[in-house]
Amino acid sequence: MRVLFVHGAFVRDGAWWWQPTADVLARHGLRSSAAVLPSCESEPRGDLHADAEAVRALLDASDEPALLVGHSYGGMVITTLGEHPAVHRLVYVTSFLPDVGEALADFGTGEPPPWHLSHGDGTAGVREEFVRPLFAQDFDDRTYAAAATRLTAQNEAVFGQPATRAAWRDVPSTYLVCGEDRATLPGTQRAQAARATDVVELPVAHHPFVTQPDLVAGVLLRLRPTT
């Protein structure tokens, strides 16, 4: 069994974000890796489907069963990827869980949230003054400084692209509700989680894999096959 992590919007260097949880998993003999999303790191920026294909390539590289974990926007990616023979289970962390035809923008009010910053060149980011209070209120200063250097512009097209597949209809799924999240409110998460096979709720903020890795790893370790 392996774990494949898919990060959320507006960040690069997924391996850094997931490393605290990866370290805990490694101590329990569970290997993990993190995807690189073209919509955040390629030039020119890729779209939602390019992100899904990047994850598919990692899954194709091995027949070993995988827990496929998507954070926030990453839930769009793992859902659009569709059913893959290597995926043992989908895990959504404070994420979006779309049906076919639904886009990330459909889960809001129709207006961009106040933290959304369009750059006018086809990319978008997060307004700096909103990052810590909404997305990282539980980061210590050192961790936040490192995280801030990994914020990036993302292809704005991904927010309007609809899911062409709904992997959760065919693959077992677990939704991790982050009960202290200020960016994706718990009520929104619970509405999304209703589509998952099962739900776990923890008293954590938007990036628990950074600040509460033992809790996140505990959930993932319990999802390993028993045989």
Image (spheres, rainbow, N blue to C red):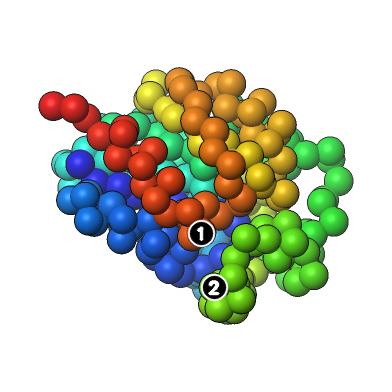
Name the amino acid, label 2.
Thr
102 or 115, which lies in front? 115
Where does residue 208 sit, x and y in percent of width and height? Answer: 52, 52
On screen, residue 18 above or below 64: below
Left or right for 124, reference 226: right
The structure residue drawn at horizontal position 38% and vertical position 63%, both measured from the top left corner, is 19
Question: Is residue 14 visible from the viewing direction of this image?
Answer: no
Residue indicated by mark 1: 211
Left or right for 225, reference 102: left
Name which quarter of the figure residue 140 lies in. Answer: bottom right
The structure residue drawn at horizontal position 75% and vertical position 71%, both measured from the top left corner, is 128
Name the amino acid, label 1.
Thr
The structure residue drawn at horizontal position 62% and vertical position 60%, both measured from the top left corner, is 138
> The residue tagged with tag 2: helix, strand or loop?
helix
197 or 161, which lies in front? 197
Tag 2–tag 1 contact (CB < 8 Å): yes
